Image: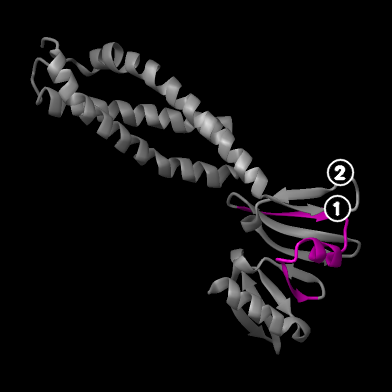
Amino acid sequence: MGQLDDLDKLKFLPIYGLFGAAGYLLCLPIQSWLARKEGKWLLRSELIFMFNLVLIGFVTSWLVYFYIVVDANPYAYTIDYFAKAIYLPAALTVFPILAIGRWSFGKYKEKQLEKDKIEIRGAGNFEGLRLQWKDLIYIQSSDNYVEVFFKEGEKLKTQLIRNKLSTIEELLPELIRTHRSFLINPVHFNQWKTGNRKLYIRLSEGIEVPVSKTYLESLKAAVNFTTE
């Protein structure tokens, strides 16, 4: 089949662009899944994402060419020729530019996320933990340490930091005390629970934290404010 003239190329170019954008959107759930699984975006994650994007891009561009551009003409380019002579040169031009754009945006987003992180400091110079506010679930006193429970991707993690719970409470007043040994992040509140004449609060990941009468009213006010 002969080459398309310049007018036909211009006519079909927006169609390729539209289907290319649709292919990119189809890959976004893969990106979200990889980010949740790894806890952070790695080079391996980007390579897996780009591989799927190239593959989906090839399938969609071939379907556009064969069923829309040439209307299933029996003399159309074979899929092998289309891949080597048309798609590969286009991919070698477009995807490096896309990769650079994604890398630049990723660095910008990384800086913004770093600014939004909170710091749970330890008593030593090199002790502490930096994390996103939404990832912190609760902190429990453990002798001369505090044990921090937080999410990293889809994993629940803990870290011991040498400090007092009262000091952490002063540094992070957004945390709510439920008990003399517990501070919680109220955004993770799920429901109240009672058992054996004791009151508990259920947080994300099915975690249950005891509630003492001393802190009940302030806890209710904080939880109601957060969930409204």
Which residue lies at the image location 43% right of the left edge and 28% below the top edge? 51
| Residue at disc 1, secondary structure | loop
Q: Position of residue 50 (x, y in %)?
A: 44, 29
Which residue lies at the image location 30% right of the left edge and 38% below the top edge? 22
Q: Left or right: 35 with respect to 158?
A: left
Within-10-Å neighbours for mark 1: few <14, some 14–19, many 20+ = some
Within-10-Å neighbours for mark 2: few <14, some 14–19, many 20+ = few
Provide the residue span drawn in magenta.
155-179
Q: Position of residue 58 (x, y in %)?
A: 30, 25
Q: Left or right: 128 with respect to 50?
A: right
- Residue 41 in view here: no
Report the number of numbered marks: 2
Q: Is residue 114 above or below residue 166?
A: above
Q: Is residue 76 above or below residue 37?
A: above
- Residue 91 in view here: yes
Q: CA distance from mark 1 to mark 2?
A: 8 Å
Q: Nearer the viewer, residue 135 or 102?
A: 102
Q: Quadrant of the N terminus?
A: top left
| Residue at disc 2, secondary structure | loop
Residue 194 occupies quadrant: bottom right
What residue would you read off at disc 2?
126
Instruction: Reply yes or no: does residue 111 show up in magenta.
Output: no
Identity of the residue furthest to the bottom in this view: 197
The residue under label 2 is which amino acid type? Phe
What residue would you read off at disc 1?
122
Q: Position of residue 105 (x, y in %)?
A: 52, 34
Q: Is residue 54 above or below residue 4?
A: below
Q: Nearer the viewer, residue 15 or 159?
A: 15
The residue under label 1 is which amino acid type? Gly
Instruction: Reply yes or no: does residue 159 show up in magenta.
Output: yes
Q: Nearer the viewer, residue 115 or 148?
A: 115
